[in-house]
């Protein structure tokens, strides 16, 4: 398995609170990605990074920000969580070929 | 953007049966991957197959890039094959995957 971990694995939070999800890799891949998975939509790209401090938006980026200060860590932040952001969030690594996915984080916003 | 369609959306089979899952895409692609999402939610890489045919045990995949489709074959199905199968594509010069909505496969003992 590719060395990708996500934390936390489960989180319940209240509307309006900030939330940060962490993705950590041990594979030294240049590219890292955040996706969300919702019923009926498959996986959709939120943001991705192509290097330290280099990030770009994906298909569903509104309400999310990201940061990458080290090759191995990619953070996803919900500045003010909303119920529509209840989802399962997956981190992936790759670029120039296959992508490999982390175990996912289940986020519930009440 | 590129559209990725998978069929059928749902498939229920008896253990031991064979199945074919299809992925159609609307534009030229540089890469194509097949994933299996097991009942615990884990996404497992099955094939990286931008073109040609590959086999791995009971599973095989074929991509015909010029005709914009890929097929995933599962032979002698087992209950552990249950889950959702996703196709995802990457266009030239674009290091991002676009996913189909998946085929949910249920294998009955």
Image (tube, rainbow, N blue to C red):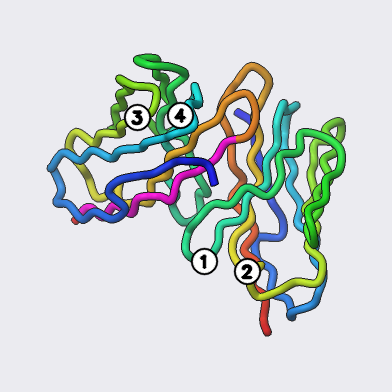
**What span is colored magenta in the figure?**
A99-109
CA distance for labels 3 and 1: 28 Å
Look at discs 2 and 3 and give the one toward the viewer.
Answer: 3
Report whether mark 2 lies on the same chain as mark 4.
no
Task: Write down the residue under mark 3.
Answer: A73
**Could you tell whether A48 is left or right of B86 in the image?**
left
CB atoms of marks 1 and 2 within 8 Å:
yes
**Could you tell whether B38 is left or right of B68 in the image?**
left
Question: Farthest front residue?
Answer: A26
Question: Farthest bottom residue?
Answer: B109
Look at discs 3 and 1 and give the one toward the viewer.
Answer: 3
CA distance for labels 2 and 3: 33 Å
Q: Residue A32 carries which label?
A: 4
Report whether mark 3 lies on the same chain as mark 1.
no
CA distance for labels 1 and 4: 25 Å
Report whether mark 4 lies on the same chain as mark 3.
yes
CB atoms of marks 2 and 4 within 8 Å:
no
Q: Residue B39 carries which label?
A: 1
């Amino acid at each position: 398995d590719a060395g990708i971990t996500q934390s936390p694995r489960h989180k319940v939070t209240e509307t309006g609170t900030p939330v940060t999800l962490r993705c950590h890799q041990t594979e030294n891949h240049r590219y890292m990605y955040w996706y969300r998975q919702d019923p009926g939509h498959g996986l959709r790209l939120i943001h991705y990074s192509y290097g330290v401090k280099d990030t770009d938006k994906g298909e569903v980026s509104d309400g999310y920000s990201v940061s990458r200060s080290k090759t191995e860590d990619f953070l996803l932040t919900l500045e003010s969580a909303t119920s529509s952001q209840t989802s399962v969030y997956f981190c992936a690594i790759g670029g120039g070929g296959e992508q490999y996915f982390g175990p996912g984080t289940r986020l519930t916003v009440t | 953007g590129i559209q990725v369609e998978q069929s059928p959306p749902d498939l229920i089979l008896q253990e031991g049966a064979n199945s074919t899952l299809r992925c159609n895409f609307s534009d030229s692609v540089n890469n194509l991957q097949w994933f299996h999402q097991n009942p615990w939610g884990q996404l497992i890489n099955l094939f990286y197959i931008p073109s040609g045919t590959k086999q791995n045990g009971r599973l095989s995949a074929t991509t015909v890039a010029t005709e914009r489709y890929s097929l995933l074959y599962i032979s002698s199905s087992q209950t552990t094959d249950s889950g959702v199968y996703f196709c995802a594509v990457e266009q030239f010069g674009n290091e991002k995957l676009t996913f189909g909505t998946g085929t949910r496969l249920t294998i009955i003992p």
